[in-house]
Amino acid sequence: MTTVTNIQRRRFLGQSAIGLAAYASLPKFVAAMGDMQGFPKVTPNKANPQFKADVEFDLFCSLGSVSILPGQNTKVQHYSAQLKTGPKDTLIDIPGSYLGPLINLHQGQKVRINLYNQLPEPTVTHWHGLHVPANMDGHPQYAIMPGAVLVYEFEVLNRAGMNIYHPHAHEATATQVYNGLAGALFVRDAEETALELPSGAYELPIVIQDRRFDQQNQLVYARNRHDHMLGLYGEQILVNGHANYQIDVESRAYRLRVLNGSNARIYKLAWDDGTPLTVLGVDGGLLAQPEVKPYVMLAPGERLDVWADFSGRNVGSSLVLRSLAFSGVLPKMAERMGGMMMHANQLPVGSEFAIFTARVTKKVSDSPKLPSKLSTIATHSVSNTANPNKPLPIAISESPMAMLLNGKAYAFNEPLPTERIKLNSLQLMEIFHNHGAGGHGRGMGMMMAMAHPIHLHGQQFQIVSRTINANHTEDYATVRDGFIDTGLKDTVLVMPGETVRIIKPFEDFTGLFMYHCHNLEHEDMGMMREFLVYA
Ligand code: C2O
Ligand code: CU
Ligand code: CU
């Protein structure tokens, strides 16, 4: 049950003549009709009758309207889905939310998803975190036109974990996600099931986003260059699509599956009463054992699996998850000018605010116990990589005009020598700030340095080391205890002045796999590149 009003397909078709006419005058749509960015023309993938799907569902991207704030409904773009084959709990709607249904998959399942584009613009969906073939990964070259259908078929190879599905259309990821197109996708496996972690009503999704609304409750996107350069920061925190989110809990342990679904905002998560956060897992699933942290940094695209134990708490008491104060993620210039650059954002980046409240409404005597061991993670050492002395570079450069990786903006299928990777290899990579790159002076580059959550498609990676430049240690001290580097990751926050080394496997699939900043404004500005994995 959901209160999202679907604009019916018939009505969509009726409106689309006007919609298309209006859109046709926009350069982006015209460009998308042709082979923009050198994308080859491809006919959308069709179902393969040989592929025997254990799970099949239709996934619709459409326009709708939903109640978010008191008063008028908010117009959104959103996912909805309908199960055709597979276990009943494959799709679970979040009541009253623009977010897509929770998708529950099991390791080993063969999955077919039919994506229906009922939007007045091209779109494509990416399964962030899943290890799937290049042509099933939602690359923008596979974007489909309004009215078209794209069929995805893949086997679930991932271990248990929380993943994301969201659009990845060329230069339109940020707006489509902002307008509401996103959802959580869980993979389950035998190892996780055997732990008997809190499940069902005791396992709760917490999708954190921030949005800006106008007087009529409508979403307002980037208004100026700063909103693009720094990222879009909303003034209203939403959890699972709702403002002022509250959950009623029993006095026992819960499992919170947290996802930062914001376009740009970075959170420093902590409980308001000083209780440390007990972390079970990150992007790529369970840690080897729980980690206890005073706070955890969560950048766009990152996930967190939290053990939240309310046992011993009294009925009527509440616990608030907050974002604490921190500094150093924005360019110094922007941080100093604060309100001016941010156009007096009521929720400045790095300020302190509440995210949601858990209210204890029922006393129970029994609660599951926190397992001391969660999983075994096969870790690699640098000496086992193909290039122990020559890490592949991922150089970040910012300037007032562009955000680049390896000195270049996104260009389809133009891999640099360091972006060509042999199939079934293990690569050492180094992500670092390179303010000299892109033809801009060092001084300006330094001034523009900011934090970037770097996301790599394909298999999860391991974080080997973080090194911070001495000029940044003061700001870094406000975030440094909030990184969890022991698990498998697909997105890593790289602070200004920081160098992060990772080890990433490239197994099973050849083709083009994107890597980019998951500050979605940066991604759409071209802070994205591709690896070409070749056999
Ligand atoms: Cu979450 Cu390439 O994306
Ligand atoms: Cu991804
Ligand atoms: Cu970025």
Image (cartoon, rainbow, N blue to C red):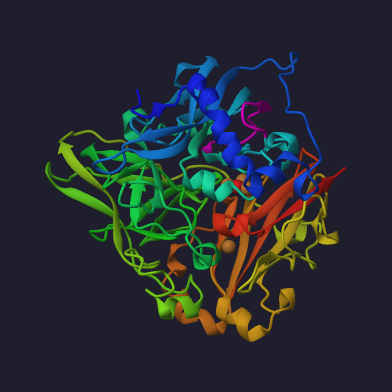
- In this rendered view, identify the residue nearer to me: 426 or 288: 426
Q: Which residues are magenta?
A: 144-161
Farthest residue in the right direction? 535
Residue 147 in the magenta stretch? The answer is: yes
Q: Is residue 417 visible?
A: yes
Residue 295 in the magenta stretch? The answer is: no
Question: Image point 42% across, 79% down: which residue?
Answer: 337
- In this rendered view, identify the residue nearer to me: 397 or 316: 397
**Which quarter shows the C terminus?**
top right
**Which quarter shows the N terminus?**
top left
| Above or below, 115 relative to 332 | above
Residue 512 horizontal/vertical position (percent): 77, 45
Left or right for 456, reference 376:
right
| Above or below, 402 relative to 70 | below
- In this rendered view, identify the residue nearer to me: 175 or 408: 175
Left or right for 417, reference 449:
right
Residue 470 horizontal/vertical position (percent): 55, 84
Question: Image point 82% across, 55% down: which residue?
Answer: 415
Left or right for 167, reference 393:
left
To which quarter of the image does residue 372 belong?
Answer: top left
- In this rendered view, identify the residue nearer to me: 161 or 167: 167
Residue 285 horizontal/vertical position (percent): 53, 43
User: Which corner quadrant of the figure contains ligand 3?
Assistant: bottom right
Left or right for 408, reference 69:
right
Question: Image point 22% across, 59% down: which residue?
Answer: 273
